[in-house]
């Protein structure tokens, strides 16, 4: 193993560490149907990949003319999502290997996600990743969600790390923008292949256009080692 210097690594959760987007889509489809909006499609869902659940519901209220309060719809979506997440959420195998590799080297690790604290805890526990990822920040805990840098800066603060020494792994354009705004390096693994040319991804230090199929723990570790700042 090579010295990674003062590097800390911050993971986005949904679509980066775990394949949770199908559960988010299904929760959204079911809840919108209950509130009188049928026909919510996967293409509709893709527009919200990378932004927080609260912001998603706020946009729904405007776009679909929902009469129910945002808080009510937000709570309904979170409840439905948690039911689905607890039943089945898959961690990407190479991401799991990467987390275990970094943890074994003593690299400080964190999760910074737009999901609720309850959803993050449920997924990390269900996948066993909670054994390695104990520093967790939800967008619900900061003033602004992605693409603002708040969640990443708070994760760095809790790790005791300087932003310049942090590397973010992200699957969505708003997250890549947030990492850039935070002054952190970024490995981008686009969840939606068609979005790989988004200008936000152009700011990433390493862009894997093939998404998770292109990501390997060993290659990511080697990239960290070659780009690390000396201790």
Image (spheres, rainbow, N blue to C red):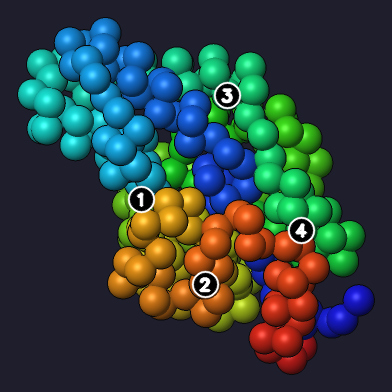
The answer to the question of whether label 4 and label 3 lie on touching residues, with beta carbons closer than 8 A, is no
Question: In which quarter of the view is residue 41 placed?
Answer: top left
Residue 63 is situated, as x and y percent measured from the top left of the image, at: 11, 32
According to the picture, the residue beneath numbered tag 3 turns out to be: 85
Q: Considering depth in this image, is 52 or 26 the residue closer to the camera? A: 26
According to the picture, the residue beneath numbered tag 1 turns out to be: 145
* Distance from the alpha carbon under mark 3 to that under mark 1: 21 Å
The answer to the question of whether label 1 and label 2 lie on touching residues, with beta carbons closer than 8 A, is no
Q: Which of the two labelled residues, at mark 4 and mark 3, occupies the earlier sequence position?
A: 3
Q: Is residue 71 visible?
A: no
Residue at screen point 44% across, 29% down: 24
157 up-or-down from 140: above or below: below
The answer to the question of whether label 3 and label 1 lie on touching residues, with beta carbons closer than 8 A, is no
- 180 to the left or right of 9: left
Q: Is residue 87 visible?
A: yes
According to the picture, the residue beneath numbered tag 2 turns out to be: 207
Which mark is in front, 4 or 2? 2
Q: Which of the two labelled residues, at mark 1 and mark 2, occupies the earlier sequence position?
A: 1
Q: Considering depth in this image, is 156 or 194 the residue closer to the camera? A: 194
Which mark is in front, 1 or 2? 2
Q: Which of the two labelled residues, at mark 1 and mark 4, occupies the earlier sequence position?
A: 4
Residue 77 is situated, as x and y percent measured from the top left of the image, at: 37, 20
Residue at screen point 41% across, 40% down: 140
* Distance from the alpha carbon under mark 1 to that under mark 4: 26 Å
According to the picture, the residue beneath numbered tag 4 turns out to be: 98
Q: Considering depth in this image, is 138 or 128 the residue closer to the camera? A: 128
**For the view shown, which residue lies furthest in the bottom direction?**
230
44 up-or-down from 16: above or below: above
Which mark is in front, 1 or 4? 4
Q: Which of the two labelled residues, at mark 3 and mark 2, occupies the earlier sequence position?
A: 3
């Amino acid at each position: 193993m090579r010295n990674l210097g003062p590097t800390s690594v911050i993971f986005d959760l949904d679509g980066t560490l775990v394949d949770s987007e199908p559960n988010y889509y299904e929760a959204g489809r079911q809840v919108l149907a209950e509130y009188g909006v049928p026909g919510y499609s996967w293409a509709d869902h893709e527009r919200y990949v990378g932004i927080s659940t609260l912001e998603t519901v706020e946009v729904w209220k405007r776009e679909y003319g929902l009469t129910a309060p945002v808080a009510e719809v937000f709570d309904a979506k979170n409840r439905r999502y948690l039911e689905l997440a607890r039943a089945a959420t898959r961690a990407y195998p190479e991401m799991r290997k990467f987390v275990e590799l970094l943890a074994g080297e003593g690299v400080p690790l964190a999760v910074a996600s737009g999901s609720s604290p309850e959803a993050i805890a449920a997924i990390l526990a269900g996948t066993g990743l909670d054994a390695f990822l104990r520093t967790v920040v939800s967008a619900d805990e900061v003033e602004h969600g992605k693409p603002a840098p708040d969640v990443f800066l708070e994760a760095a603060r809790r790790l005791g790390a300087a932003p310049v020494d942090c590397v973010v792994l992200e699957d969505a354009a708003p997250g890549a923008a947030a990492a850039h705004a935070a002054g952190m390096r970024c490995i981008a693994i686009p969840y939606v292949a068609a979005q790989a040319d988004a200008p936000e991804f152009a700011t990433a230090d390493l862009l894997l256009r093939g998404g998770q199929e292109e990501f390997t723990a060993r290659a990511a570790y080697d990239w960290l080692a070659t780009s690390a700042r000396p201790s």
